[in-house]
Amino acid sequence: MEQVKRMKWWGWGEEGVFFNYQDKPAFAPFVKKHLGLDLRPRQVDTIRFDAATVPDSTLPEPLRADLVGATASDRVRVDAHERVVHGHGSSVTELLHVSRFDYGRLPEVVVYPASETEVTEVLAACLAADAVVVPFGGGTNISRSLQLDPAERRPIVSLDLGLLSGVLELDEDSGLARVGAGTLGPELEEALNARGWTLGHFPDSFTHSTVGGWAATRSSGMQSDKYGDIADIVRGMTVVRPGGIVRLRPVPSESTGPSLREMFIGSEGRLGIITDLWLQVHRLPAERVVVAYMYPQWSAAVAAIHAIKDAEVPTTFVRISDANETAFSLSTQKKATSPKKKLARLAQSGLWALMRRRGWDTDAMCISYVCFEGSKADVAERRRRVVKIAKEHGALVLGTGPGALYDQKKFDTPYLRDFLLEQDVLGDVSETAAPWSKLNGVHDAVYAAARRAFDELGKQGFVMCHLSHNYHAGACLYFTFAFQAGQDADREYATVKTAIQQAFVDAGATLSHHHGVGMEHAPWMAQVVSTEGVSVLRTLFEATDPGNNLNPGKIIDPPLSLYDHLER
């Protein structure tokens, strides 16, 4: 569908955009040290799509006719490329298989409704034919919320919401915007910025994900310290359901029984199709600056961030990388080519030498970034308060240069994962949230679990972490892990991922802070929300979707599990 921008079929993002390690002189030695791998130059610029590798659609003709009647013939697509793009999300295992032409179960058809009325009629046609309906936003989900059940024999319809886009209303008195569910992040920010507003929601997937997808998976953006998670941002919505349309008006708060708004947020398409949302928006700040700090070790950095939160210093985000992630970040610095950059690199080397002379273990140091927004006076005052707390915890202030660099490349990380896949390295993430009192314990438990998993596989692996998304009671820990894949990549991946996820739960954390449940995290739901909690969810899904037509097998009762690969 030409009007709707979608990612390349075989990996993340746009064709022609790559991670390039050859202009980063420290990166190849870093990989060699931690993964035992000699990197080779990129050999694949693209993977040519071959329609002959895709089985033909078996869409029943009566259903096709009904879908065309509900929309238009050019918006009911059965061609191979459309079906492959919409047959998976962006989890590392999905992309591993798809890039090797192993597509798994594909939808029979992709439909592009252009209005709420068309969504209603498409859903009615699908239910009448006992078809499965899977809403599709940007395809960026990494928890397998879009992966299809290979045993499903009913027709599967991928409902792409990309034509339901744009800012539909803007209530400037209230700071509320009504937005189409298929609106991509950059499209939304451009429209809001043009009128002096911002949503402030910037997940890592921002450039390719949609507003509806954010809500359906309970997303959080990197600036949530100021703007809130998506559950805070969404104030109302419209949801098309089998029995009718739910309209939730945008009010600041209400006492209307159990929250329907909260129920739909994070429901991953199992309760209906979100068509538009009312979102809380903010005036663009007069000034924005990101400042970097270096702490001597992880525990000091965590204590400092907790102190900043306790002091209620208004920040847009506060993030710290542990020692491993700090070393990784430094390894991705580009080669200094200009005289100015060469001087800056010399100054950095001199600073590290000075720190070592003062007793720092530079292998343990942790970099932190703090973003400040507001008036010039407000930003200056908040920076002073944070500097005081940071120095009390042993930090050095690195200034705005490293902070500006972080801000510029914050959406580039997913391309690194594709590069590693080409090198036969599985690199992925697991994130969680825990109270302040448990964060260090969770951090240590995950490192230990990952190392045991690597040892079990006989692999040299790497794990790193950052802390972000700070709350009064705790914060998010975001782990990245990587290892060289062997002949049984699915089993190897499952070994590491299940170890990390179980470590979360055993240490008192949750299964995910902002990536959703899907099929990937469903095995831990009973441990996190209790067996009775899962029973409540099952009762809800069965009552509201008795035919099991709405994205079945997500959140609970998954047809595919990571543990399947461990039981072979």
Image (cartoon, rainbow, N blue to C red):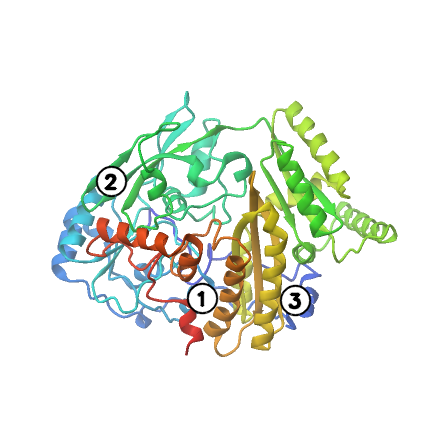
Mark 3 secondary-structure assignment:
helix
Mark 1 secondary-structure assignment:
helix
| Residue located at (41% from left, 62% from top) | 523
Query: Pointers 3 and 1 in contact (CB under 8 A)?
Result: no
Residue 309, image x, y percentages: 62, 37
In the rendered image, is residue 334 in sight?
no
**Residue 99 higher or lower than 200, as above or below:** below
**Residue 558 higher or lower than 208, as above or below:** below
Residue 217, image x, y percentages: 40, 49
Q: CA distance from mark 2 to mark 3?
A: 49 Å
Disc assigned to residue 115:
2
Q: CA distance from mark 2 to mark 1?
A: 34 Å
**For this rendering, which residue is in front, 57 or 252?**
252
- Disc with the residue nearer the chain's start (2 vs 3): 3
* Mark 2: amino acid: Ser
Residue 363, image x, y percentages: 75, 58
**For this rendering, which residue is in front, 491 or 507?**
507
| Residue located at (34% from left, 57% from top) | 554
Pick the quarter of the image with the C terminus: bottom left
To which residue does mark 1 refer? Answer: 93
To which residue does mark 3 refer? Answer: 31
Residue 406, image x, y percentages: 63, 46
Mark 2 Cα-neighbour bin, 10 Å: few <14, some 14–19, many ≥20: some
Would residue 286 be found to the left or right of residue 528 on screen? right
User: Which residue reaches farthest front?
Assistant: 532
Mark 2 secondary-structure assignment:
loop
| Residue located at (31% from left, 60% from top) | 553
User: Which residue reaches farthest right?
Assistant: 357
* Mark 1: amino acid: Thr
